[in-house]
Image (spheres, helix red, strand yellow):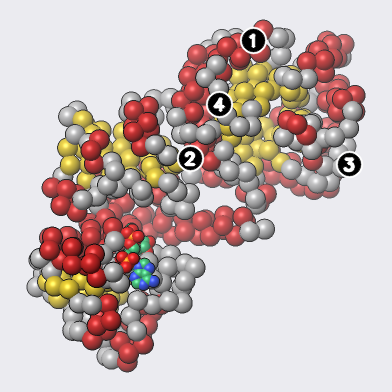
Amino acid sequence: MITASIIPSSQKELTILLEEALKKGDLAEIRVDLADDLNLLDICNNFDIKRVIVTNRKKDEGGKFEGSEKDRISPLIDAIKLGFGFVDIEASSNDLFQELIFKKREFSSKTNIIRSYHLFDKTPNNLKEMALKMKEANSDIIKVVTYANDITDNLKIKDLLSSLSNNNKKIISFLMGEKGEISRILCNSWGSYTTYAPLKRAGKTAPGQIPIEILNDVYRANSIKNDFEIYGLIGNPVKESIGYYVHNKLLSYHNLDAIYLNFLVDDLGRFLDSFKDQFKGLCITMPFKEKIMPYLDKIDPMATKIGAVNTIKKTNEGIFGTNTDWIGAVYSIEKVSSIKGKKVLILGAGGTGKAIAFGIANRKGETIISNRNEKKALELSKKVDADVVSWSDRNNIDFDILVNATKVGMVPHNDSCPMEESFFSKDLSDITVFDAVYSPINTKLLSMSKERGAKIANGLDMYIGQAMAQFELWTGIKPAHEKMEEYSMNALKLREELNENKGN
Ligand SMILES: NC(=O)c1ccc[n+]([C@@H]2O[C@H](COP(=O)([O-])OP(=O)(O)OC[C@H]3O[C@@H](n4cnc5c(N)ncnc54)[C@H](OP(=O)(O)O)[C@@H]3O)[C@@H](O)[C@H]2O)c1
């Protein structure tokens, strides 16, 4: 079950939000402490209150209520009397908890009392003993929510839920913080009674919270089972990646019992050690593309040459690593132009420039490399047998294909371009221009080149090409380009929307 948590500032707003919350969630939580004039009787007359949790959080438990304990418990007693489905009271407020139990009996109410425990700075190792103690009290449900300082804290919640949820008492447990995000997605499959999620329209969410629309529509949180295969992305940061959207949509489209998650990792060795039995395959991003290599049992020759792995898969022979970045770049370019025998100028000698240079060599193109830091261009040129041109001369040489593998032109610097104005004074109808940047898709380089007649290939197709290769490696299914394009475009739109909301 998913509980939509809402933060109404008034009764009027609550009516609108609760209707939406109960449409999108199985349950809805009303935080009484966050609104001034809530009228529970009015809610009772207009909504299915059996699906509503009433909570009145005090300040030192992460809420806003600052009055007396007597005033704090009053709406919870009203909720019990009116027959709301749930009330939530902190484990630290034992007197209030006992009073609620007493009132429940007095009113012969069926309201479930949730006894909740929050820890805002860590996830201790003794969670299980603590939860067992909480279970001894007479609550209907216990809730244990702690803070993730490391991705491996998620496994403590998994362990807690799998050992306690099959007892007769219901338990809710997940983690706060960005590193605890995966627990909010998987906790139901681990045995949690429910997970919590805000409405997307609430805008600013706490780190790790996932809007209910995404939990439902992208992660299929209510359908995930404990035996689902796990794929995902490891990196730091991971939150700007669109892979979670694209891969989950693909897994769902192909009816696969699998899920794709973002793992925000600090310590690669500790992650691999703790999660080695959990995942089937992973995408690898900064800063782990090179660091992952010593941990792998087999690496394909192209990734070894490039010196970076962006995809791994568990096999019977151990963990296999490969690189699909070059496949994506070649995929995008070959949609508009062949590469064999063509003169290709690559701008950039970072991670992407390196992968593309090997891709061009694989397709028998003649490579010329130009990089702001010429030393890096020279080093790469030796590995791929390429020529080098200085950064200041890049506008003055002839080539058939231009590749931008620098960061120039990427948001928020959409106005910048890796080629100078003079380059666009020529007729470019004989050349192809490819830009690896895909935020924005139509970069200044691509739009100006197109105006001068060039054929253009974009970074979104590179993303699509490399993600298709990853999905095929993991599942054996080659996804259709149209589906990839649809999902990638939707993912970019969603990312923009969420980033805009953050600024509110
Ligand atoms: N479409 C896709 O699927 C895909 C996949 C991966 C990456 N990308 C894109 O590829 C681009 C490069 O990523 P990366 O991983 O290779 O980054 P990276 O390893 O950090 O390399 C950055 C490159 O950009 C150059 N650069 C940065 N600022 C510059 C400036 N102001 N003027 C000239 N050159 C500049 C750097 O030159 P110096 O060496 O001189 O610093 C270096 O060559 C990014 O825009 C990224 O979004 C796209």
Q: CA distance from mark 2 to mark 3?
A: 35 Å
Observer-nearest residue: 466 or 348? Answer: 348
Estimate how packed mark 1 is, as few (under 14), some (14 to 19) or many (20 or more) residues with alpha carbons within 10 Å: few
Who comes first in sequence, dot 1 or dot 2? Answer: 1
Q: Is residue 347 left or right of residue 76?
A: left
- Label 2 is placed on what type of residue? Tyr
In the rendered view, would you say 342 is above or below 210? below
Q: Nearer the viewer, mark 2 or mark 3?
A: 3
Q: Quadrant of the N terminus?
A: top right
The amino acid beneath tag 3 is Asp
Q: In the rendered image, which residue does mark 4 sit on?
A: 123
- Does the beta carbon of the residue at mark 4 sit less than 8 Å from ligand 1? no
For label 2, the crowd category at 10 Å Cα-Cα, with few meaning under 14, some 14 to 19 and many 20 or more, is many
Q: Quadrant of residue 473?
A: top left
User: Does 429 sit above or below residue 188?
Assistant: below
Residue 344: x percent and y percent? 18, 73
* Residue under label 1: 133
The residue that mark 3 highlights is 37
- Give the structural element (helix, strand or loop) at label 4: loop
| Quarter of the image where one finds residue 372 | bottom left
Q: Nearer the viewer's eye, disc 4 or disc 3? A: 4
Mark 3: C-beta under 8 Å from nearest atom of ligand 1: no
